[in-house]
Image (cartoon, rainbow, N blue to C red):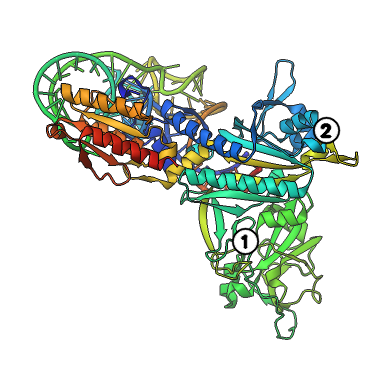
Amino acid sequence: MRWSQYFLYTLREDPADADVISQKLMIRSGMLRKVAAGIYTYLPLGLRSLKKLEIIVREEMNRAGAIELLMPAIQPGELWMESGRWKLYGRELLRIKDRHDRDFLFAPTAEEVITDTVRDAINSYRQLPINLYQIQTKFRDELRPRFGLMRGREFTMKDSYSFHVSWESLDETYEKMRTAYSRVFTRCALEHVPVEADTGNIGGSASHEFMVLAKSGEDAVVSCPNCKYGANIEKATSTFFSDEPEPAPMTEIAPLHTPGTQSIDDVGKFLGKPTSQLVKTLVFDSDQGCVMVLVRGDREGNLIKIKNYLGAEWLEMLPDSRFENETGGPVGYCGPVGTKAKRVLADVSLRAQKNWVIGGNKPDTHLGGANPGRDFAEPEYGDFTTVFAGDPCPRCGTPLEIYRGIEVGHVFKLGTKYSEKMNCTYLDEGGQRQPMIMGCYGLGIGRTVAAAIEQSHDNDGIIWPMPIAPFEVVVTQIGREDNVRATAEDVYRKLIDAGIDALLDDRDERPGVKFKDADLIGFPLRVAVGAKSLANGQIEWSLRKDRAKQLGASADVIMRVADEVRGRRV
RNA sequence: CGGGGUGUAGCGCAGUCUGGUAGCGCACCUGCUUUGGGAGCAGGGGGUCGGAGGUUCAAAUCCUCUCGCCCCGACCA
């Protein structure tokens, strides 16, 4: 491709509304153009990277035995009513009416359509397992799209769905998919880590997320530096608490006058105790009713864990205005003793502790020496708090570390959640009708490209890993002399003939502009042809990574460059 | 959905308080000079000032309504 004939225009200044580096660089380098909030045009340069990643994903999916198909982006609401998700999915689901006033939606995922497809075609255990995938545009009407391709509304995702007669068979495919995902990210030179994850709205029994570690990541990931334990912070557990009961005897329960101490920090300061020796009371509202959750004063409640424990569809902090009514205690002084709350949960870290300091359910009053079982009903114990950095690993006890990560892939064991609701069954050896056991596997195409940029850039621009670089080499023609022009043209031709994906910068621009653009776009290799070195019969090449310039005769440089490219393709 | 901000040329911004012929930088066009890290000079083109209504002799500027976008929060296969 000749740049002078191409559709590629860079921006000298950062776009005003870009909030992460990958978005800034993609817009500045002419890869991406915003059309509306969370909705983008992939310009020719950006599309090249996406398509290259898609090819890699296809190769790995096919290698793992998955079969490609393409389902509609616009789907009938009917199927989603059948699965129950028409109601469950909130405002994030973009609902559309056609001219006959029938319900449709722009799909955020495709469990319903694939299940509908498979139940029609497959009737026998002999036809299973099967693993089908597509690479398709999805839409999720995010409340707040941001971070460019990392959290758009319209986005491209590879999604696969597998169908099985047994959990063992699902396990096999699940492992194959995990391996395939790791291979995809490794080929893109992405430092990634698979972690245990919550199954969220999709549901299912097990789930792993593939995280690319990056400062700008939206998720927090807990990871053990010693063993392989890794988990999303929503899900991560630790063993920081002791289950050994305190030897101390129970003391008398006694009110403490604690005026003006609504926060746990205030109470600690007022009483001269570390917050770890206090008990914090949280109150939530959910579809299962109001619950009180007790956690150690220095710990944070984990909404996901609580929600899962309750089996609730939704859970949120109870608004202050409803506190008195639901618990009988004022905000800041609420507690389990004499509360109106019907269910009281307590984090396991409290189980061994005695003589709690806790809200007294009266203004300006806390209680000391409160003991469950004696002063109030024994609460339901469980893991309801979020892991902190330094907490011991649940598997090996090593202090855990916390990182930021970008979720680029997510695999789920769905089980029979959809097959049962949608009657997707097969006949087993005994002629019995059985629901198929399902798995599903998502991989964000745009997000992965964005993650690659987040992980690989410098002050001057992107530094592409070879496999997803929009072009592998830029041939920069410096100056307009005939021999420069001819040599650049010749080098470009020969690289193309050697199967190298090269772009010839034949624009009528000054050298500085061309170099800056090349750095910004981040071509992994650059070949520069200019009168200066050409006078000695030499041309120059360098890697974007280190920019170390090397000179040589053009035939040698072409060979070297072609070798470098091939060596880095993976 | 709550709080805050913003909308002026393709991009980045000033002008709004205090109403009086719409500006700057980048990009674009022409010419000359320049040519190995975002050139200089001269000339030029391009804007319903987000939209609607109102006040006024006069509105980018004041008032009302509305829409888009951004940030924080809640939310998130």
Q: Position of residue A127 (x, y in %)?
A: 77, 35
Image quadrant where one finds the C terminus of chain A:
top left
Q: Nearer the viewer, residue A196 or B7?
A: A196
Q: How far apart are marks 2 and 1 (CA)?
A: 45 Å
Q: Nearer the viewer, residue A536 or A70?
A: A536
> Are discs 2 and 1 less than 8 Å apart at CB?
no
Image quadrant where one finds the N terminus of chain A:
top left
For mark 1, what is the residue? A386
Q: What residue type is labelled 2?
A: Asn
- Which quadrant would residue A426 be assigned to in this image? top right
Q: Which of marks 2 and 1 is nearer the N terminus?
A: 2
Q: Residue furthest right?
A: A431
- Which quadrant would residue A2 be assigned to in this image? top left
Q: What residue type is labelled 1?
A: Thr
The answer to whether residue A325 shows anywhere in this view is no
Secondary structure beneath label 1: loop
For mark 2, what is the residue? A123
Q: Position of residue A467 (x, y in %)?
A: 44, 38
- Which quadrant would residue A479 be assigned to in this image? top left
Mark 2 or mark 1: which is in front? 2
